[in-house]
Amino acid sequence: MQTSNHINESFIACRSVSKFFGTFKALDDVTIDIKQGEIVCIVGPSGSGKSTFLRVLNALETIDNGEIIINKVRLPGDQKDVEEVRREVGMVFQQFNLFEHMSIRENVTFAPRVSRAVATKDADELAETLLKRVGIIEQIEKYPNHLSGGQQQRVAIARALAMKPQAMLFDEPTSALDPEMVVEVLDVMRELAHSGMTMIIVTHEMGFAKEAASRMLFMSAGKFLVDMSTEQFFCDRDHPELRRFMSNIL
Amino acid sequence: MSKYSFPVIVALVLGVVAYFLNWELLLSLDFSVVWEYRVVLLKGLMVTLALTACAAVAGLVCGTMLAIASQTNFAPLRWLVIAFVEIWRNTPLLVQLIWIHFALPLVTGINTTALESGVIGITLQAAAYFTEIVRAGIESVPKGQWEAAYSLALPARIRWTRVILPPAIRTMIPPLVNLTISFFKGTAILSILHVSELMTVTNRISNVTFKPVELFSAIALIYFVVGIVMSKATLRLEYVLQNRER
Amino acid sequence: MRFDWDQLIRYSPDLLQAFGVTILISALSLLIGIVIGMFACLGKLQQRGLAFRLANGFIDFFRTIPEVVLIFWVYSCLPLLLSVRISSEACGVIALSLFSAAYLAEIFRAGILAVPKGQVDAAKALAIPRYHIWKRIIIPPAIRRMMPAFINFLTELLKATSLLSAIAVGEMAYTASILGAQTLSYFEFLSAIAVLYFVLIFPFSLMARRAERKLLKKTGH
Ligand SMILES: Nc1ncnc2c1ncn2[C@@H]1O[C@H](COP(=O)(O)OP(=O)(O)OP(=O)(O)O)[C@@H](O)[C@H]1O
Ligand SMILES: [Mg+2]
């Protein structure tokens, strides 16, 4: 068992992280710590760098400055470090990105088999457990394009969980969904939050954030302008930019 | 794989090639023959370009007529157009050329010169390919435009020239230009009939000067330069057309 | 004019053999072209550096020069430059392999680039090793997407083999012109091979069109 001391140590630590696209600065000297078990919601205007921040945490984008330490592994690093980080951090995308030419079962079992060397039988059992948990076990032999958006996103969550990650990143997981499907995905995420998973969620679902998040970040122009506990965030809003943003989406 | 492995492989390959090359011949290469015959070669290039233009213009005219014909309700005419297009697209240009030059006169009794056969062959081939493109262009015009033209009772000629063809042509331009470039390449096949285009001319010079390496390398370069200029210009044109639409 | 079936029947073994030569040369050139084309494609996918420049130059050059010029260059220059004897059949295969490699490299590349970026991102995020990403995530959909262009290229390659008659390779067009000149039955022989080419090429055209329709339906554009 881990000591309480260990749990309080930050699981993700960013030190002066900057990211450029050409001359455009998408992340501007970001320094932030995220502890194990925290549920962090990130909000902010379009183009402010929220997706880029998540992608950087999963080494899908390389950083130009600073360093990131995730679970004691340092980024930027070599291919081995990158894969080590990705094994411990799962990611869920706005557009689901399920593997179109694989059945739901293969989608969920593929990664554990090839990157964690899990036996096919065990991977199958794990997939069935996870698909039951997200409520779509009946669809296991179907292909992604036969599923609704909400179902696809739940498969995507199960697929990421199959790697048994210690943290999960969600990039606007419900923005591409019809309103009636948003609930089913948020329910799965809520259940995941209660199970103690470390989560970083980019979302515009303020109701969900208020109820599930333990900490709120407001991003603007590549910087975190606001970093507060959820209660604080939803009570006092004296930050002018944040107030403008909130009045626009609420 | 280190980052040096690729340059090392390249160096090795170059080394092997250098070892097998006939350096004696390579060092005795004399490209002055290209300059010596520049006028003849230039004339050959002009013939090549003229044939290309001919294929493009005559092919486009025939292709447009055939494409319009393929839109009629008269089924036999439609089938005839389809048969023509499929036969000419699915046989090699070279076979078409020698068929027109050697076989056809036996049936018609009309003897054609090499140039005539060549022009007929490449024009018909161009017509077949252009028909497909024009047809796709016409079919890309929204149905509403047709219905509007019909409901206004516009005469057929006006319907085609003022309503259907203008938007169709805009979508057709990039593939048309690309095809024209491929006919530029295709004209070299006419050398099989000894039409005096660039390739034929080069063959002739090579036969009297015995300098094939210099000559064929030089015209490969000429074809490459002319072709690459045309295709880069097409890319540019496509870019401009795309940006204008927005 | 009477259509002389007897001549055709008498020389049908020669035509059949020429048909075999056409197929054989196409198949060989295609195989070699696929191998070289894959390397050229990988080079061009680098987007910068020495490998990219080499691959890009190779592809541009062999796509732009006329096939006839390439065939003549290989036939009349390569043996001199390397001071070895190369049979005209081998010259034909070399030239058509280079031609195929350049076109196939672009076809492969287009197929690979058509795989949505999100698929690769998702695979990377799952820590799937690079080898498996290529094998299971990129290549299968890429092959599906490049199929119409690939089959279409087969028709171009089959047509291009006829150009080898210019360097006296005993394929269909050459055999037919020789037989035509010998017997003066040009019409019979040239028509016969025109039909043979059509019968050989047309099914591929139809297949390419069907593959295209299927793909359009699937990707829904
Ligand atoms: N691959 C890229 N190349 C160039 N610019 C990029 C790239 N990816 C993102 N950007 C730019 O970086 C900025 C931040 O993008 P990012 O996707 O992180 O924003 P976001 O906060 O997620 O916005 P949204 O709410 O629209 O998803 C944007 O201005 C975008 O144009
Ligand atoms: Mg985003």
Image: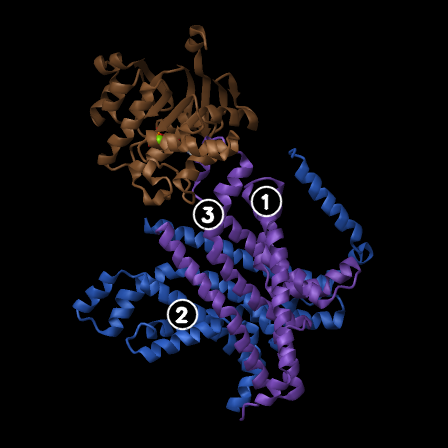
Chain colours: A brown, B blue, C purple
Q: Which residue is mark 3?
A: C141
- Above or below residue B164? Residue A237 is above
Task: Give me the residue at 36% from left, 54% from top.
Answer: C217
Is residue B113 in view? no
Check whether the beta carbons of the residues at disc 1 and disc 2 lie within 8 A of each other. no
- Above or below residue B27? Residue B215 is below
Q: Secondary structure at mark 2?
A: helix
Q: Position of residue A247 (x, y in %)?
A: 20, 23
Marks 3 and 2, how far apart at CA: 32 Å
Task: Name the quadrant containing residue C188.
Answer: bottom right
> Which kind of residue does numbered mark 1 sit on?
Gly
Q: Residue C90: which disc?
A: none
For discs 3 and 2, the disc positioned in front in the rendered view: 3
**Whether the residue under disc 2 has CB within 8 Å of ligand 1:** no
* Circle 3 Cα neighbour tier, 10 Å, few/some/many (<14 / 14–19 / ≥20): some
Q: Which residue is mark 2?
A: B131
Is residue B131 in view? yes
Marks 1 and 2, how far apart at CA: 37 Å
Q: Secondary structure at mark 3?
A: helix
Choose the circle earlier in sequence order: 1 or 3.
Answer: 1
Marks 1 and 3, how far apart at CA: 20 Å
Task: Give me the residue at 22% from left, 12% from top.
Answer: A236
> Which kind of residue does numbered mark 3 sit on?
Pro
Q: Residue C43: which disc?
A: 1
Asked if labels 1 and 3 share a chain, the reply is yes
Q: Looking at this rendering, what residue extends furthest in the bottom direction?
A: C1
